[in-house]
Image (tube, rainbow, N blue to C red):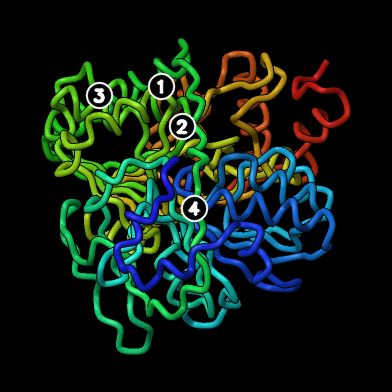
């Protein structure tokens, strides 16, 4: 690696360059640290990994706020070093997850659009130090983010001091792909001036007073690649159900020919759905989303996607190599924004976004659990699914109808934890079929969901529960002493089905 100084174009900052071991001396016990990173992309790496090493011999605990999940096992290593007291707003690390579920780390599972605004208005403590990954610092002192923006712009504004980590592994051609808009404070805050997915409303970098930069560290650790499972028979069936639904909506005049802006959660099911567009008749598609995955760039390559707005590029190893090698092809077709813009409810409602996210389970009345296994154990977090679901033109959740070889039904009498309630959900899809719930009362929704989404091996039991609940009556019929019995039985026997 070269020394990277050519990426620091404000030469007065060259004197701030130091080792990661020196930089971590700025971080003290009890501090709030705001750090780059979203979807395992664009995080600072050298400094937090050095902090984990430092904490092994110099015990300290910090509150760590990021954009979303981190790569390079950073959460794991900070957790194992006992360096985390509190973590928000999202994580996806198995070691940290275990610590959270054991009560060792306090985890604030937060809507991703909310963190920066809560800090701005002092509902959350502001960072003492921000650690910001960058591909460059411009002549006028702008910090140019890497493969994600996340909360970096707001953290840099709020923090007392900033450590900039220059990522020499990221192709500098990425400069110019970002659109950094920082919202003003209330009261009398005006609307965000964005009316189309491709609108540019900010600057190419993060503006801060260069005097706040306390350290600059060079990084040669690449971003982690995202492992993408291949589409299987069930995920392909889900994609086909959705494509058919969209075709019908266009034919009925309820959606435009290009559907309007699309949002997709992370994962193999979402990727399969978007892969389905490649072989459909849809064209001129656009995204207003948070994470841009391999499928986004494949649709651009296929001439199906005309523009994609997001917060992060979360790519497989092969996908990242392809995108970075050919980035000039994509530069006028994507924008990376701060997450309080990419996930902003005001903009999601204005643009008429169609949201497609993944559920752990949903119940017969369309309440969705997307975070807690068996109602108590945190998986990852709500992420941006709530931001989009509550304000989308169409709010869609997808899931396979069964898990663990049929031991678990994803369609249950009552969800064991509610992240998205019945008032926000329009469409539910499994490989079994699609339930269009728009305009339906609870009893009508239950019938649609059981008939169209439940696995055949659980359909009879769901019908039996619903029919007996209806005898008791109510707007939303339930048998309270049985409503969570499927989960209780799984905890006892490893099977939701009665033996």
Q: Nearer the viewer, mark 4 or mark 2?
A: 4
Observer-nearest of 16 and 271 = 16
Residue denoted by label 1: 238
Residue denoted by label 3: 277
Confirm or deny contact between disc 2 and disc 3 (CB under 8 A): no
| Cα–Cα gap, marks 3 and 1 | 12 Å
Residue sitting at 17 percent across and 37 percent down? 328
Could you tell me which secondary element the residue under label 3 belongs to? helix
Observer-nearest of 242 and 29 = 29
| Cα–Cα gap, marks 4 and 3 | 41 Å
Could you tell me which secondary element the residue under label 2 belongs to? strand
Residue denoted by label 2: 398
Mark found first going from the N terminus, 2 or 1: 1
Q: Is residue 55 left or right of residue 328?
A: right
Q: Nearer the viewer, mark 3 or mark 1?
A: 3
Could you tell me which secondary element the residue under label 1 belongs to? helix
| Label 2 CA crowd tier, 10 Å (few <14, some 14–19, many 20+) | many
| Label 3 CA crowd tier, 10 Å (few <14, some 14–19, many 20+) | many
Query: Can you tell which quarter of the image residue 304 is in?
Result: top left
Q: Nearer the viewer, mark 2 or mark 3?
A: 3
| Cα–Cα gap, marks 2 and 1 | 7 Å
**Residue 247 position (above or below residue 205):** above
Confirm or deny contact between disc 2 and disc 1 (CB under 8 A): yes
Residue sitting at 26 percent across and 72 percent down? 140
């Amino acid at each position: 690696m070269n020394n990277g100084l050519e990426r620091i174009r404000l030469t007065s900052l060259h004197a701030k360059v130091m080792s990661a071991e020196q930089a971590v001396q700025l971080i003290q016990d009890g501090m709030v640290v705001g750090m780059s990173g979203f979807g395992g992309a664009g995080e600072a790496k050298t400094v937090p990994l050095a902090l984990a090493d430092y904490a092994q011999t110099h015990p300290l605990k910090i509150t760590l706020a990021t954009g979303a999940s981190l790569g390079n096992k950073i959460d794991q290593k900070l957790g194992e070093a006992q360096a985390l007291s509190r973590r928000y707003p999202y994580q996806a690390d198995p070691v940290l997850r275990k610590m959270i579920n054991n009560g060792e780390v306090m985890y604030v599972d937060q809507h991703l659009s909310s963190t920066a605004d809560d800090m701005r208005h002092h509902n959350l403590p502001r960072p003492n130090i921000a650690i910001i990954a960058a591909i460059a610092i411009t002549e006028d002192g702008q910090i140019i983010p890497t493969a994600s923006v996340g909360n970096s712009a707001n953290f840099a504004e709020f923090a007392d001091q900033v450590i900039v980590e220059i990522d020499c592994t990221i192709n500098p051609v990425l400069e110019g792909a970002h659109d950094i808009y920082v919202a003003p404070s209330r009261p009398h805050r005006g609307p965000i001036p964005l009316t189309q997915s491709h609108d540019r409303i900010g600057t190419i970098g993060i503006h801060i007073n260069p005097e706040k930069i306390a350290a600059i560290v060079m990084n040669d650790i690449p971003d982690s690649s995202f492992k993408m499972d291949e589409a299987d028979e069930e995920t392909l069936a889900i994609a086909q159900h959705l494509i058919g639904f969209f075709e019908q909506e266009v034919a009925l005049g309820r959606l435009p020919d290009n559907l309007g802006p699309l949002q997709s959660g992370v994962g193999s099911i979402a990727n399969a759905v978007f892969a389905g567009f490649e072989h459909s008749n849809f064209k001129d598609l656009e995204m207003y989303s948070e994470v841009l995955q391999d499928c986004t760039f494949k649709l651009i390559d296929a001439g199906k996607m005309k523009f994609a707005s997001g917060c992060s590029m979360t790519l497989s190893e092969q996908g990242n190599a392809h995108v970075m090698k050919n980035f000039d092809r994509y530069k006028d077709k994507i924008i990376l924004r701060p997450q309080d813009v990419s996930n902003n409810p005001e903009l999601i409602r204005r643009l008429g976004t169609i949201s497609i996210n993944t559920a752990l389970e949903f119940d017969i009345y369309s309440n969705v659990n997307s975070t807690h296994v068996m109602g108590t154990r945190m998986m990852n977090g709500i992420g941006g699914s709530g931001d989009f679901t509550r304000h989308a033109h169409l709010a869609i959740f997808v899931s396979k109808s069964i898990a663990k070889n049929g031991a678990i039904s994803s369609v249950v009498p009552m969800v064991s934890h509610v992240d998205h309630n019945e008032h926000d959900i329009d469409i539910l899809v499994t490989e079994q079929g699609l339930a269009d719930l728009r305009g339906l009362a609870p009893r009508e929704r239950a019938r649609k969901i059981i008939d169209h989404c439940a696995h055949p091996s659980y359909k009879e039991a769901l019908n039996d529960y619903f029919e007996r609940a209806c005898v008791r009556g109510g707007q939303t019929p339930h048998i309270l002493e049985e409503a969570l019995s499927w989960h209780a039985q799984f905890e006892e026997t490893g099977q939701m089905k009665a033996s």
